[in-house]
Image: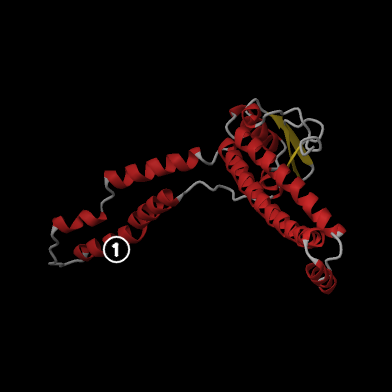
Amino acid sequence: MKSQENDYDMTDLANATSDINFMIGESIAEFSSWTQQTMLDGNTVIHNLADDTQYILTPEQMDNFNQAYADGLANSTPEALTAVLLNDMIDLEQSTYEEEKEALTDAAKEIAAVTEIADKLVNGDQQTKINAEQYATDNDLRAIKESSRQNFNTSISGMLEASITKNMIEGYAQDSVVIDVIADAFMSTNTVMDFFMNTAVSIDQLVPTQLNLDWDQHSVGVNSFMYEVYSNDPQQTLEMTPR
């Protein structure tokens, strides 16, 4: 599991910073060069003060920067970055779900191709049965393959786990206590970069309402009342649910 250090949109802060840096860098250098001409002995150059406004740092520029800067700081706390990581995890589970769904569809098509021939053998006339048998032979469809069965079942389990995990993370991401527990864990162990670069999330097999986050040599398990909102029966295990 990999996450950006901060997915908060820093566009406003980047633009405001660039504007301020331009004013105190290139702009002030140009201003210094421009006004220095009047400091030479015997200089007769007269400049119009009305043209100097472009070199002034305006209150609007300062206010824009300060607001963007405040937002940037607020969204760079351990707690805010933990929320970012959880949102990244939600996206990952969504992607996993879609991949498993595609694999399920492929496996279902392979199985359906065999059952379609079986239906013709049951309900077709003599010529249909002969054609079906020949088609099955020519296309290696004389039985449902074990690989198709395994892919079908694995995809079902993958979709289920991704769906439950995604819903749990969505609920937990709204719980400030959960956020604090996770943030405190990686801050207190001084593993910030490992946490954000390597964290893997999973549902605890013994406690189905607990999310486990594992990274480097550390792990933290968290629970939240918010899971009740997203689960009809949180006491069921992943193995029990499909049955």
> In front here: 122 or 91?
122
Q: Residue at (63%, 32%) from the top-left corner?
A: 230
Quadrant assignment, res 188? top right
Place of residue 113 in the rendered image (x, y in percent of width and height, measured from the top left): 76, 62
Amino acid type shown at disc 1 = Glu
Quadrant assignment, res 67? top left
Question: In the shown orientation, is residue 66 left or right of residue 119?
Answer: left
Q: Residue at (54%, 48%) from the top-left corner?
A: 7
> In front here: 26 or 19?
19
Quadrant assignment, res 219? top right
Residue 200 seen in the current view: no
**Would you name the residue on which mark 1 appears?**
30
Question: In the shown orientation, is residue 139 left or right of residue 79?
Answer: right
Place of residue 177 in the rendered image (x, y in percent of width and height, measured from the top left): 62, 27
Q: How many labels does the image show?
A: 1
Residue 176 seen in the current view: yes
- Residue reaching furthest to the front: 125
Q: Residue at (83%, 73%) from the top-left corner?
A: 134
Question: In the shown orientation, is residue 190 left or right of residue 71?
Answer: right
Mark 1, other Cα within 10 Å: few <14 / some 14–19 / many ≥20 = few
Place of residue 163 in the rendered image (x, y in percent of width and height, measured from the top left): 67, 42
Place of residue 209 in the rendered image (x, y in percent of width and height, measured from the top left): 72, 30
Tell me how the rendering is colored.
secondary structure
With respect to residue 82, does 16 lie above or below? below
